[in-house]
């Protein structure tokens, strides 16, 4: 059980950067701030709801059901994401504002 929890903690570290990449890939530039805000709010909400929910299920039906219920709830996001997601090509086709990229800012430094 300890090894599973350690693996979960190590693999969770990629969740926030992956969500950020998905938001940048799938959302239009004017929608990205809201996407990041919703993502961060959902992460916080999930961290508040999951422990009491898992504890309730654990005490009522046992630890196996706690894993099953929280896992199924996590899988329910797949159809929702599929229903509202856009193809990356549709977002990439949107015109983007021209600006200085991060590399351009540091390319001609005089120091």
Image (tube, grey):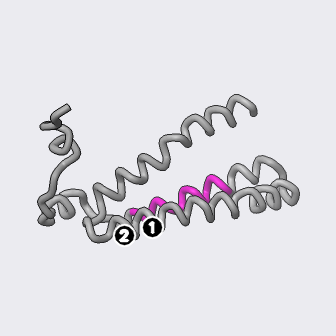
The residue sitting at 27% across, 70% down in the picture is 30
Point out the image quarter for the C terminus. Answer: top left
Q: Magenta region, mostly helix, strand or loop?
A: helix
Q: Secondary structure at mark 1?
A: helix
Specify whether residue 103 is painted magenta. no
Residue 65 relative to residue 36: left or right: right
Q: Residue furthest right?
A: 59
Quarter where residue 6 is shown: top right
Q: Residues within 10 Å of mark 1 (few under 14, many from 20)?
A: few
| Residue stretch in magenta | 70-81
The residue sitting at 75% across, 53% down in the picture is 66
Image position, residue 50 (x, y; %): 70, 59
Image position, residue 33 (x, y; %): 37, 66
Q: Which mark is residue 80?
A: 1
Residue 34 relative to residue 64: left or right: left
The residue sitting at 58% across, 35% down in the picture is 10
Q: Disc 2 marks which residue?
A: 84
Specify whether residue 79 is painted magenta. yes
Q: Secondary structure at mark 2?
A: helix
Marks 1/2 in contact by CB < 8 Å: the verdict is yes
């Amino acid at each position: 059980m300890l090894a599973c929890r350690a693996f979960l903690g190590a693999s969770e570290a990629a969740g926030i950067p992956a969500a950020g990449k998905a938001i940048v890939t799938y959302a239009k530039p004017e929608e990205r701030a809201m996407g990041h805000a919703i993502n961060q709010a959902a992460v916080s909400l999930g961290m508040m709801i999951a422990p009491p929910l898992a504890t309730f299920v654990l005490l009522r039906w046992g630890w196996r059901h706690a894993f099953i219920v929280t896992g199924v709830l996590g899988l329910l996001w797949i159809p929702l994401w599929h229903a509202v997601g856009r193809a990356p090509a549709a977002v990439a086709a949107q015109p983007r504002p021209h600006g200085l990229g991060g590399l351009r800012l540091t390319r001609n430094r005089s120091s």
